[in-house]
Image: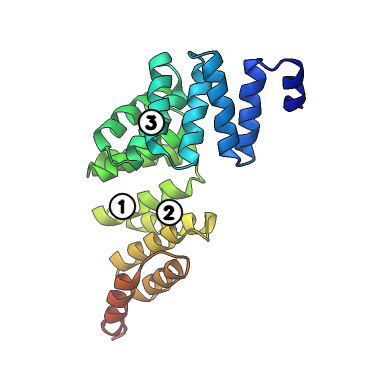
Amino acid sequence: EFEKALLIDPLNVNVINSLGVCYSSKGEHEKALDKFIKVMTLVPDDVMAVYNAGLAYHMIGDKAKAMEMFLKAHALDETQFEVVIQLGRLYLEMKDLEMARKYLEKAAAMDVESGPAHRFLGECYNELNMVNESVLAYSKAVKINANDAYSLSALACLYARQKINQEIAIVFARQSVDLSPSTALFHYRLGKVYYLHDRFAEALKEFQIASELGHDCRSFIFETENRLPADAS
């Protein structure tokens, strides 16, 4: 229908942008990008077209161009929450942790009820070894969305490392696996929590599942197997 609309009005930027969004939804990101760039050519200060182009570049793996688009969108309108959180997320992926922290803290302040903003902020704080801040951010994410498997899993590991809320750590780690049983990372983290509780048989089982799902757990499996005889005796 959007393609038909363009036959009638080929320079309608709303239709062109919407067609790009349709292509993105279908996973046809190159076609989507072509539409967003066309909108940017017609209306250079269309912040949503610039933002959408950033998303398309990100999806096709061009992080440098994605960053360029997100920064341009932010310069056009600093009040756009989605732009700010995507900047923080991309900086986090690129391991520029201080810049990631800057934008993710801004995103969390802009929308205090955004679970993803607090989740990404928790991940950033964890990478910066700001453990207490990471726990707080992940806790907010879980409070907003009790089914946030990633935050539950990460929070479980942080509790286990700090040797606090030990039983809650196991509950959270198990819950993350229940919510997403095919995610190798969550099985691996549950294994680590079990291991830190000296529950080596259960840890080994989770490490083996994680390995089968594609997570490299060979060293943990070997180490846990070596702990089993002492644990059994």
Image coordinates of residue 158 in percent, x first then y, are 30, 51
Please report contact status of discs 2 and 1: CB closer than 8 Å, yes or no. yes
Could one spot residue 77 in this view of the protein? Answer: no
Question: Label 3 vs label 2: CA separation?
Answer: 34 Å
Question: What residue is at 72 percent from the left and 15 percent from the top?
Answer: 9
Q: Please tell me whether residue 12 is drawn above or below residue 153 in the rendered image.
A: above
Residue 67 marker:
3
Q: Nearer the viewer, mark 3 or mark 2?
A: 3
Question: Label 2 vs label 1: CA separation?
Answer: 10 Å
Question: What residue is at 49 percent from the left and 41 percent from the top?
Answer: 60
Residue type of the residue flagged with mark 3: Met
**Which quadrant is the N terminus positioned in?**
top right
Residue at image mark 1: 159
Image coordinates of residue 228 in percent, x first then y, are 31, 81
Residue type of the residue flagged with mark 2: Phe
Q: Quadrant of residue 29?
A: top right
Could one spot residue 211 in this view of the protein? Answer: yes
Residue at image mark 2: 172
Please report contact status of discs 3 and 1: CB closer than 8 Å, yes or no. no
Question: Label 3 vs label 1: CA separation?
Answer: 34 Å
Would you say 151 lies left or right of 14 here? Answer: left
Image coordinates of residue 25 in percent, x first then y, are 62, 37
Image coordinates of residue 199 in percent, x first then y, are 34, 71
Secondary structure under the numbered disc 1 in the rendered image: helix
Question: What residue is at 41 percent from the left and 58 percent from the top?
Answer: 185
